[in-house]
Each structure stands twice: as structure tokens, then as C-alpha cells.
Image: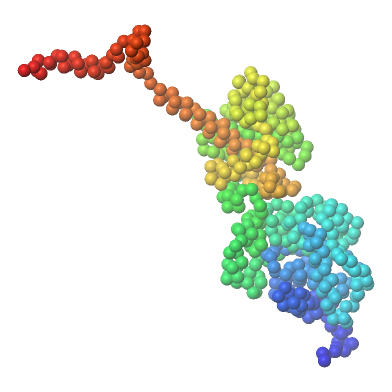
Amino acid sequence: MSYQLTKKEITKEILKSGKNPTYFINNYCKISHPMKGLIPFKLYDYQEDLIDDFNDYRFNIILKARQLGISTITAAYIVWLMLFHRDKNVLVMATKFSTAGNLVKKVKSIIKRLPEWMQISKVIVDNRTSFELDNGSQIKASTTSPDAGRSEALSLLVIDEAAHVDGLDELWTGLYPTISTGGRVIALSTPNGVGGWFYKTYIDAESRRNDFHSIKLLWDVHPDRDQTWFEKETKNMSIRQVSQELECNFNTSGETVIHPDDITFMEQCVKEPKHRTGFDRNFWIWEEYKPECTYMLTADVARGDGQDYSVFHVFKLETAEIIAEYQGKVTPDIFSNILFDAGKEYGDCLLVVENNSVGFAVLEKLKELEYSNIYYSVKSTHEYIDQLTAENISNGVAGFTTSLKTRPIIVAKMEEFIRNKLITTYSSRLYNEFKTFIWHNGKAQAMRSENDDLVMSFAIGCWIKDTVFVENKRKIEHHKACLTSMFKSDSIINTTVPGMHGYKSIEKSNRIKKNVKEQEKFSWLLKG
């Protein structure tokens, strides 16, 4: 027969548990273990530290490895918060509604497995993904819809797998007012590449640029894990999976179009521009014009009133370098003048402008300004033709057309250039865009709330460099080889046959005739 606590001892235990969540969890909470079944929840050191952080800091953001029990410890903390405090309103959000619902189920399960005398508040409303206690505290799972939690005043907001929640930037804008009266936040996740609310909030928290307390929990914080365990677990995992699941590495965890190693190499090349010029100082120059060099300018045009930027790159073709770059929010009319001036500055270089809706307006303005080296192609193809030829034919199209068909091609060419280190970039702005340029449903694009204007301008330039300049050079060399292989022969070929009108015996070659003459000259030596 188990020992029964006296009423005084029960009161003492309840008071002690209410003051100390770690004591409460270690002594009274039980959890389901996948192998051992129902077991007491005995906290590891890192989990006790986590509980202290939940109590000490209003905002906590946790970058974690997999299978460290962080969701479970969060559920146990919620049990303590709801049980020993009145009128606490907890909202749980996750990548999927079912994931948020599972955390709510953990909370409910821990409460129901407490000793009956410790259940000082009873469940009075019990739904599949929410429940309420008779002390007024409640918890519910929520979808990640834009209006989630907007009409509530929250005591605690839990965002599980926050790095994987799409559009969390917009969600946070709506959620923040619900906790502005003193509510707390626990955002936890494995990394999911660079970019997005979780990444930016965690990085800012590390630099103390916001109110969040940053916590990083790598795979080795668990006392049962060592190098042998790590090697066994990672044997059949990719680099990206290891980075995401175990090493908490933002840079190598996402589905970036460019391989993380190549992005790291690009970072090593980043350097400050020699000049920051232009009316908005957004024209960055690393090298001035050199008359002996050939240049190309590629541009992506935006309206100037939205999230996108109008951008361009200046390629130095001999060395395959980006030696100048512009990024700014200007009207198409102003951008046309900036392009004209930049093209002139770099020796009337070939000017390649994406001919989207506003791109056509820029191209027309450049024609009015009489820029003499605009990129043209044959309609429905990307066969380059010079401007003079294009202006005299009906199917010449100014600018470069980016479509559903051409976008994958130019992105693939860009990736090839970067992977094989065929081009050098120095821009921190371009580097930052590559970190958030990802595969999403099979399409290469910027992460939500990020930009890829510089990336696409750069991709167009890589494709043009490889097709227009390299292919044209190959054609010229081929034609030259054909011409130099031609020669003139003075030999006479008799194509008539006996019986034909004009038939004559085939004349001997000059060499044979010469030999015959030599024989006749010295024929006396053969006599006798």
C-alpha cells in the first residue's frame, strides 16, 4: 500500500510546486516514452535551464536540434502555467494544425496523469484541439491563417517549428498586439535556411537588437549522445539534413538553389565598393572603366512603388567579374536615365534590359535617348541580332524576355557559372539574395518577403555572356577556320571521256613533263 500524504503535506507540495516549475515537473509529471511507455519526466540539465529561461524572459526563441524533448518540456511548462495561475490564455501555432493539436494533447495528457490531489483545477471544456480548466485558464491549437489569435489577449504564444511556418512575418504583425499587455512568447524550431521571421528574429536576438532571448541547443546537449551516436545517425543523411536536424546551421539547412559551399565561397569574395555614387548612392562601383576591356550591362526593371527593386549589373567580360551594381526603388523614367549614363560610362556597352511590362517603357526611353547598343533578339527566339539589323526587320525584339520557359534555363546557367567558379562577384547585396533564393514547389524563387531582383539580373547576364559572346566567338573562329582552310589550285582537270566532243588526251602534269624533258636531255647516257 502506497504512502498517503497528509493534508498538510499535500498543501506544502502544492505550494512548492506552484512556486517552482522545475520541482513540479520532476516530481509529478509523467510522459509517454516510445520504448518505455509511461515514465516520470526527469529533466536533464539543459531542460531545467530552459524552464528557468521560460520564467526569466518574456520572449524566448529556441534554435534546436531534433529529438531533444523541447516540445514536451514546453508542454510541461504550459501545464504548470495553467494549473497554478488563473485565467491564462495559451495559443499554440505550428506548420500544420495537426502539429499544434499534438502539443495541446501532450498538455492535456500530462494534466490527466497528475496525482488526483495535484489536479487543483479540473478540465471543464474538453475538445480535440483545445480545453479549459475551471480556474479560467485555457489552451487551443490554431492554424497559421492571417487572422489567427487577432481577437484574443494571450498569456502565452507558442510557435512550434517557427522557421517552417510560411508568412510568419505577416502573422507576427497581427499576433504581436495580442501579447502586448504582458503576454509571453516561446518560438522554437530547427533551422530552415536563411531568411524569414525565425531567422531574422533569432539573429537579431543574438545581437541583442530585439527583446527576444536566444537559445541554441545542438544535438550534443543531450547526455545520452556522443560522437558514435552522431556518426551512426548521420550515415544516411545529406549535408542539408545534418545541418537542419542536428547542427542548427542556418546557412546549410535550406533548399537554396545555389549549394551552401558555393554561397560560402561567394561570401569570401564580398568586399566594400570603391565608390557609392548616384543620387541615392545605390550605384556601387568596384572598378572604373578601362578602354581596353569589354563590358555588358544587364538590368531588371520594377515599377518603383512596390517591394521589388530596379537593378542592374556591369559585367567585365575578359575577367568574368561584376565590377558595378545598382539597386534602388526609382520610377522607370529615372531608371532609364541611370541605365543610359551607366552604359555610356562603360564604353557604350551592350545594354540588356528585361522587357517585362515596365521594361518596355524603359527600352522605349533608351531608344529616344538614342542609345546605340541595345540587346535585340529574333521574336520567339533568343537569337541575338545587332541593333542596326533589328531596326530594319519586322521580327526584331528589344530586350530580354524572361518567361516560364526561359527562367529555368537562365537560372541553370547561373548555377553552372557559380558552381564552376566561372564568375566573380563582390556585392553583399547579391550575396544576401542568394542566401534566400530557394526551391519552392520546384520553382527557383526568393523566400517569402525577400527579393531576387539582383539574382535574376545576374542570371540573365550569365546566360547572355555564355550565348551571345561565347557562341558568337565560336562562330567567328569556325568561319575563320573554314576560310583559312580554302586554297587555290592551278591544276587542270580533264572531265571528258573518249568519244565526247572536245576530248583530248590528258596532259601530263608539270612534274611528269619536266622528268620527260630531263630524260630526253640525257638520253645519250642510256644508249650503248
Q: Quadrant of residue 203?
A: bottom right
In this view, the residue farthest toward the front is 499
* Drawn side of residue 497 relative to residue 411, left or right: left
Residue in the image at 67% along x and 49% along y: 438
Point out residue 259 in the picture as x, y percentages from the top left corner. 60, 50
In this view, the residue farthest toward the bottom is 1
Residue in the image at 68% along x and 47% along y: 442
Evaluate whether residue 355 shows in this view. yes
Evaluate whether residue 138 shows in this view. no
Q: Is residue 512 above or below residue 431?
A: above
Point out residue 197 in the picture as x, y percentages from the top left corner. 75, 54
Q: Quadrant of residue 299?
A: top right
Most foreground residue, 257 or 208: 257
Point out residue 116 in the picture as x, y percentages from the top left corner. 87, 81
Residue in the image at 59% along x and 37% along y: 463
Q: Quadrant of the N terminus?
A: bottom right
Residue in the image at 91% along x and 72% along y: 123
In this view, the residue farthest toward the top is 501
Q: Is residue 164 above or below residue 66?
A: above
Point out residue 238 in the picture as x, y percentages from the top left corner. 61, 58
